[in-house]
């Protein structure tokens, strides 16, 4: 599996955030990523535009939704994955749908410098998302060390 602790080395990990919209999620996460010099100033606009054209929401069932927003490598300085869990679900569009909405509580933002790694990373995340126990642990996670333990335990 490609996903490991190295992709979380900058610790852009946010827990139980009280946000009301996808744009608030993107604003907060992009700011944190810029503060750590992981992404360029163009990242937030690029990720929002890509999400409009290629939605990344996934309904895992049982009312649990995740999103995997990402954008092109030219907006990224360094390989990294940012994570944010939400106190209340935020609406994303279902991947591959023009109209279907997904209430999302877990967001994994991919920052990858090589486009060819995106497919493998998405496949690895999908494998993780297939494990209900791991999803429950992500939902319950409240700090960085617990999060890294989840990543290292898979």
Image (cartoon, grey):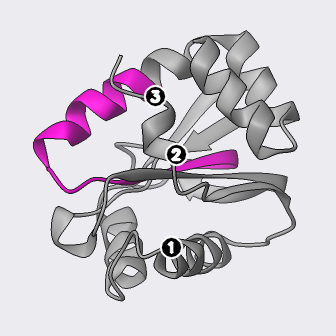
| Cβ–Cβ under 8 Å for marks 1 and 2 | no
Residue sitting at the far bottom: 41
Circle 2 sits on which residue? 8
Q: Position of residue 87 (x, y in %)?
A: 88, 54
- Whether residue 61 is visible to the viewer of this picture, yes or no, is no
Circle 3 sits on which residue? 4
Q: Nearer the viewer, residue 150 or 105?
A: 150
Mark 2 crowd level (few <14, some 14–19, many ≥20, 10 Å Cα): some
Mark 3 crowd level (few <14, some 14–19, many ≥20, 10 Å Cα): some
x 36%, y 78%: residue: 43
Q: Magenta residues, as a range? A: 100-125
Name the side, left or right, on which 72 lies relative to 95. Answer: left
x 45%, y 15%: residue: 127
Callout 2: helix, strand or loop?
Answer: helix
Q: Quadrant of residue 1?
A: top left
- Whether residue 122 is visible to the viewer of this picture, yes or no, is yes
Task: Identify whether 37 is placed above or below 8.
Answer: below
Q: Position of residue 68 (x, y in %)?
A: 46, 47
Give the mark nearest the N terminus, 1 or 2: 2
* Label number found at residue 137: none
Q: Position of residue 146 (x, y in %)?
A: 79, 32
Q: Quadrant of residue 88?
A: bottom right
């Amino acid at each position: 599996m490609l996903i490991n602790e190295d992709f979380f080395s900058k610790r852009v990990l946010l827990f139980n955030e009280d946000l009301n919209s996808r744009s608030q999620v993107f604003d907060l996460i992009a700011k944190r990523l810029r503060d750590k010099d992981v992404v360029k100033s163009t990242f937030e606009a690029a990720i929002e535009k890509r999400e409009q054209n290629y939605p990344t929401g996934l309904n895992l069932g049982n009312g649990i939704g995740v999103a995997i927003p990402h954008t092109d490598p030219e907006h990224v300085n360094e390989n990294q994955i940012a994570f944010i869990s939400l106190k209340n679900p935020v609406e994303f569009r279902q991947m591959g749908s023009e109209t279907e909405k997904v209430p999302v509580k877990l967001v994994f933002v991919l920052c990858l410098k090589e486009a060819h790694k995106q497919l493998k990373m998405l496949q690895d995340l999908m494998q993780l998302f297939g494990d209900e126990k791991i999803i429950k642990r992500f939902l319950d996670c409240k700090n960085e060390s617990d999060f890294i333990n989840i990543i290292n335990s898979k």
